[in-house]
């Protein structure tokens, strides 16, 4: 039995798998990186899709930044190969709803869905919302 | 911007959807602010997008301990997510978070969902609204979605031989429960649609 190890320097991850008939198993992974400070909670969510049918092949994407729908201050930080990062937090989160970058991932056939929470910082009152 | 790891190729096309207030309003929610947290997503075999998350209505009392519900929402498909067509239901009555049971970063709870056919099991923890200081307990809810939901004519969260009987009884009585396609009319198409749903789940009735 062979094994492969994928190492990611992230936190709060979830994993889903699908086994298409006649094809190698496909795994999907979502993980988040939260940068905390006294002023803001920020982070980003990444998703990946990979297969184990020989040499593992993983593809990564910033689940938020590519959408263009995230308004408000977007934090640009060099990350690995240079990612565009979306803010995942604000400063007006009440107790019990401090932002948490805890993504969930599900894969079905050729579709990968990643759910996570975030804040639309254009809003007067910062609220956490669910995104997909 | 897509990232690359281990020389992998370009990632998939993607879209991001916000789970909006208006989508929740379609099922009787009151207008107002909301807080959502800890979403779990599950794609089902019919292409449905199922979400399980914590929902909190903003009471405007910033110092009060929030009362939240565990909310389930299902969109028929990813392509339908821009419309107001999510089926939404609270799985719990409102319950308070406490200093020992909280939700979010550096706190301790979240929800999970698992799929078996068109049955979804939702696991979550909550406090007892009557005695929140006693701590939290874990619960599992069994939900039927898609064809299973249509086939469950007696609405007992099980699909078995009693369901066609219940459907025919409802149809004969002119009950809206027999309006399977939700077009406001009871006719032969409802019988066809019900039979197809039941057959897909349990075989020919």
Image (tube, coloured by chain):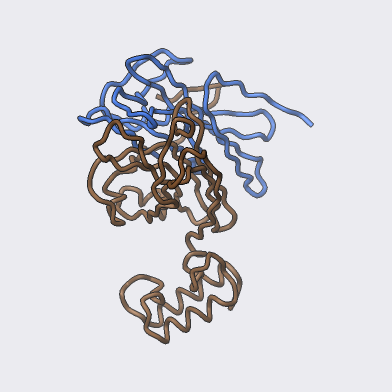
Q: Residue furthest right?
A: A1
Residue B91 locus on image (x, y percent) = 44, 52
The reply, left or right, for residue B92 in relation to residue B23 is right
The reply, left or right, for residue A126 in relation to residue A51 is left
Q: Residue furthest left?
A: A124
Q: Residue at 55% of width from left, 57% of height from top?
A: B119
The reply, left or right, for residue A3 in relation to residue B81 is right
Residue B48 locus on image (x, y percent) = 45, 53
Residue B191 higher or lower than B73, as above or below? below
Residue B110 higher or lower than A6, as above or below? below
Q: Residue at 36% of width from left, 31% of height from top?
A: A118
Q: Tell me if residue A109 can be seen.
A: no
Quadrant assignment for the C terminus of chain A: top left
Count of labels in the image: 0
Which colour is chain B painted? brown
Q: Nearer the viewer, residue A38 or B1?
A: A38
Q: Residue furthest bottom?
A: B172
Chain that is coloured blue in the picture: A
Q: Tell me if residue A9 can be seen.
A: yes
Q: Nearer the viewer, residue B59 or B143?
A: B59
Quadrant assignment for the N terminus of chain A: top right
Residue B40 locus on image (x, y percent) = 48, 41
Residue A50 locus on image (x, y percent) = 58, 33
Residue B186 higher or lower than A96, as above or below? below
Could you say which quadrant of the image residue B62 lies in? top left
Q: Residue at 20% of width from left, 30% of height from top?
A: A124
């Amino acid at each position: 039995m062979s094994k492969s190890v994928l190492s990611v320097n992230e936190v709060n991850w979830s994993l889903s798998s699908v086994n298409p008939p006649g094809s190698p198993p496909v795994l999907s992974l979502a993980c988040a990186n939260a940068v905390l400070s006294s002023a803001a909670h920020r982070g980003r969510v990444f998703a990946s899709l990979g297969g184990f049918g020989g040499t593992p092949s993983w593809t990564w994407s910033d689940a938020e930044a590519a959408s263009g729908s995230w308004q408000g201050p977007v934090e640009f930080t060099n990350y690995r190969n240079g990612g565009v990062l979306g803010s995942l937090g604000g400063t007006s989160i009440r107790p019990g709803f401090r932002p948490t970058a805890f993504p969930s991932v599900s894969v079905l056939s050729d579709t990968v869905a990643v759910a996570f929470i975030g804040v639309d910082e254009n809003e007067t009152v910062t609220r956490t919302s669910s995104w997909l | 911007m897509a990232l690359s790891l281990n020389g992998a190729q370009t990632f998939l096309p993607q879209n991001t959807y916000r789970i909006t207030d208006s989508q929740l309003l379609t099922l009787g929610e009151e207008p107002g602010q909301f807080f959502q947290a800890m979403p779990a997503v599950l794609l089902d075999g019919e292409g449905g997008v199922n979400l399980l998350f914590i929902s909190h209505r903003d009471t405007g009392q910033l110092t009060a301990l929030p009362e939240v519900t565990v909310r389930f929402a299902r969109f028929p498909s990813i392509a339908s997510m821009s419309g107001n067509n999510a089926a939404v239901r609270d799985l719990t009555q409102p319950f308070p978070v406490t200093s020992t049971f909280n939700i979010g970063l550096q706190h301790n709870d979240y929800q999970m969902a698992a799929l078996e056919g068109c049955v979804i099991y939702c696991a979550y923890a909550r406090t007892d609204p009557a005695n929140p200081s006693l701590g939290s307990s874990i619960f599992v809810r069994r939900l039927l979605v898609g064809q299973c939901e249509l086939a469950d004519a007696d609405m007992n969260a099980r699909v078995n031989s009693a369901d066609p009987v219940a459907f025919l009884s409802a149809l004969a009585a002119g009950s809206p429960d027999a309006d399977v396609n939700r077009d406001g009319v009871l006719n032969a198409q409802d019988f066809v649609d019900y039979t197809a749903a039941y057959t897909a789940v349990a075989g020919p009735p």
